Amino acid sequence: MTSTQTRTTVAELAGAHGPFVSLYLDTSGPVPDAAQQVELRWRAARRRLAAAGTPERLLDAIEPFTRRAHPGGDTLVVIADAAQVRLVRQLPTPPSVEVATYGPVPHLLPLLRWEQRQLPVLVVATDRIGAEIVAMQADEVDLADTVTGETLHITRSQPGGWSQRRFQQRAEDRWEANATLVADRLAELVDEIRPRAIVVTGDVRAVQFLRDTSSPRVAELLHEVQGPYDSTDAAVEQAAEVVRRLADADVAAAVETFQRERGQADRATGGVSDTLNTLARHQVDTLLLVDDPQLLARPAYTGEKPDQVGATVGAVSALGVDEPVPAPVGDVATWAALATGARVVAVPTDLADQVPDGVGAILRYTT
């Protein structure tokens, strides 16, 4: 059995029905026998999944993905529901811990942690003729574009006498016209892709013309990176650092909002019990989970529906569930958040003291 649903987004998984297979398989290794090492890891993971009760048909459906995982990435992520493989991803870094579980809710936080750092960004290498543009999108194929303007009188000449100023002005006008073409194309891509940043490099004067000719909504996204870059390749590497800073700022802003709302006794709650209760009531706008496996492995309870969650059997029974089942609190909370349209933020451990018990929520409304 193969899947036609492997491009499902994490949010779209909320409509699936468990139990679920969650596999994070280490597929790294530049050594000649890397493929054989991946096969051995998969065999070990398959035995663990089989022992947990995973149907053979699901294991058979997952196996083809493991065979072609190397060298596609360093972590193979597979999420399968009761019927089929629903999601497959290849992540560029090895997993901190390999995961192979079969349970009532999927294990999604490692994937969400990676996705929250994959912000869409445009990378631009510009010169006085035009620009090369790469649109880097989370979990999408990168798009490449080229904008080329006119080259007539593009180089400043140095004729003597009264004509010098006229020739130089003509070159300046052409550079600016070409920069306008690039700015117009960027405006189109901003509307299409909604990037968090536009990382630009290249000829200093061309960059300045681009900044001057861009609309405010484009100009506010521009991040200039310095260096001897004559193509987008090196700029893409620099863009990774820009994206990292933006992603870190997003997390810090979410934690700051959480702290502010808690301080005002307003739209925030913390701790396992209170947070799960607000998830059950669909109150949560943003779920914060400290990225600590020990904290998130503590038991919580859930029913057949993702929003039937609580810290105790009694709390879930009160929601009309006859037989609540245990599952790690991190997985229970994440699953409920996705099902109710909440954002999930993985909080680094250096901010753990800002989120009590490692679990908290910014609320849509208070009761």
Image: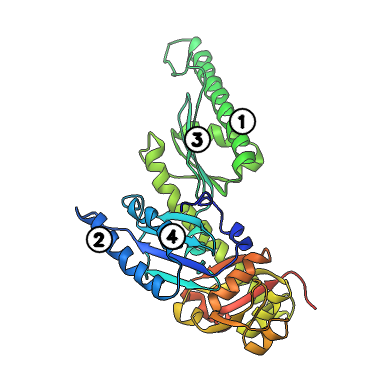
Read off the residue under disc 3. 207
Q: Gap in Å between the C-alphas at discs 2 and 4?
A: 17 Å
Mark 1 to mark 3: distance in Å? Answer: 14 Å
Q: Which residue matches tag 1?
A: 184
Q: Is residue 231 visible?
A: yes
Residue position marked by numbered label 2 in the rendering: 37
- Residue visible at 53% across and 81% down? 353
Please provide percent x and percent y for residue 39. 28, 60
Q: Amino acid at mark 4?
A: Val
The amino acid type found where label 2 is placed reads Gln
Across and down, in percent, residue 141 comes to 48, 42
**Compared with residue 296, is residue 118 higher up or lower down, i.e. above or below?**
above
The secondary structure type at the circle numbered 3 is helix
Q: Is residue 274 left or right of residue 31?
A: right
Q: Residue furthest left?
A: 32
- The foreground one among 3 and 178 is 3
Quadrant where the image shows the C terminus: bottom right
On screen, residue 105 above or below 92: below
| Neighbourhood count class around disc 3 (C-alpha, 10 Å): few under 14, some 14–19, many 20 upward | many
Say what amino acid the circle numbered 1 marks: Asp
Q: Earlier in the sequence, mark 2 or mark 3?
A: 2
Name the disc covering residue 297, or none.
Answer: none
Query: Of callouts 3 and 4, which one flags the residue occurring earlier in the amino acid sequence?
Result: 4
Q: Secondary structure at mark 2?
A: helix
Counting residues from the start of the chain, the first of labels 1 and 3 encountered is 1
Residue 311, image quadrant = bottom right
Q: Which residue is under mark 4? A: 77
